[in-house]
Image (spheres, helix red, strand yellow):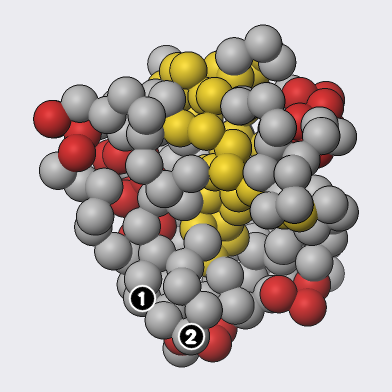
Amino acid sequence: MKAKKHFVLFLILAFVLTFTACSGNNQGENGETDYTPVYDANATSDALPSHTRVTFEVENYGKFVIETYPEHAPETVSNFLALVEGGLYNGFKIEKITQSKTILTSEISSSISADSAAGQYNTVSGEFAKNGRSNTLKLDKYTVALNHIPDEYDSGKAQLMIFLSSNHDMDGSYAGFAKIVEGTEVIDKIAGVEVDRNETPVSPIVMKKVYINE
């Protein structure tokens, strides 16, 4: 009978010690409770934004790659990627180069297909402060934004702006949605070409192939 009693007491003591040890693991150095962070920096999850990369092959110049940031401009990114998948940007030209400011692409492709034509006239709600939308992506050098008609904030379609310098006076006026992460030397080379009085390159610059990276 005594042995049975001692065995029960032993089990109770073991349980108490185990519970105390587990509780201690949740205490920080100052005795504060340690909480598991909401996001693991090394984890991947569908809940986290996908920074899709898109490659632009520019005829006679090489390639550059942009990375999209849907946490800043989700509708703009979604529309842009749909246009890329549809082949809209294949054949786009560089329409204008404003020295020390921006590179502007054309608005339509020179070799547009019937399939990709369907989405080229879709407009996107301007995701920037002047249009009452939150977008904290600064318009630094090599940032990519969607152009729009001045004072018509929801008129953005497919024309891209690539910033050649930091233009923070334009922050809140355009939807920055991506940055160039590879091939900045290609952009620098394009920025230095000869342009006419309308700031259009004298020799056409064509983006012969634009595609989403696997």
Q: Report the residue marked by disc 1.
A: 154
Q: Residues within 10 Å of mark 2 (few under 14, many from 20)?
A: few
Q: Quadrant of residue 200?
A: top right
Amino acid at pointer 1: Asp
Residue 98, position as x, y percentages in the image: 76, 54
Q: Residues within 10 Å of mark 1 (few under 14, many from 20)?
A: some
Q: Quadrant of residue 42?
A: top right
Point 41% across, 48% down: residue: 107
Judge by depth and name the residue closer to the eye, 136 or 18: 136
As helix, strand or loop, the secondary structure at mark 2 comes to: loop
Q: Nearer the viewer, mark 1 or mark 2?
A: 2
Point 42% across, 25% down: residue: 91
Residue 196, position as x, y percentages in the image: 74, 44
Point 32% across, 65% down: residue: 124
In the picture provided, is 87 more to the left or to the right than 26? left
How far apart marks 1 and 2 lie (CA) works out to 9 Å
Q: Is residue 47 above or below residue 210?
A: below
Residue 69, position as x, y percentages in the image: 53, 50
Amino acid at pointer 2: Asp
Q: Quadrant of residue 125?
A: bottom left
As helix, strand or loop, the secondary structure at mark 1 comes to: loop
Q: Dots 1 and 2: beta carbons under 8 Å? A: no
Q: Report the residue marked by disc 2.
A: 151
In the picture provided, is 143 more to the left or to the right than 6? right
Residue 24 visible within the image: no
In the picture provided, is 141 more to the left or to the right than 145? right
Residue 15, position as x, y percentages in the image: 45, 48
Judge by depth and name the residue closer to the eye, 180 or 209: 209
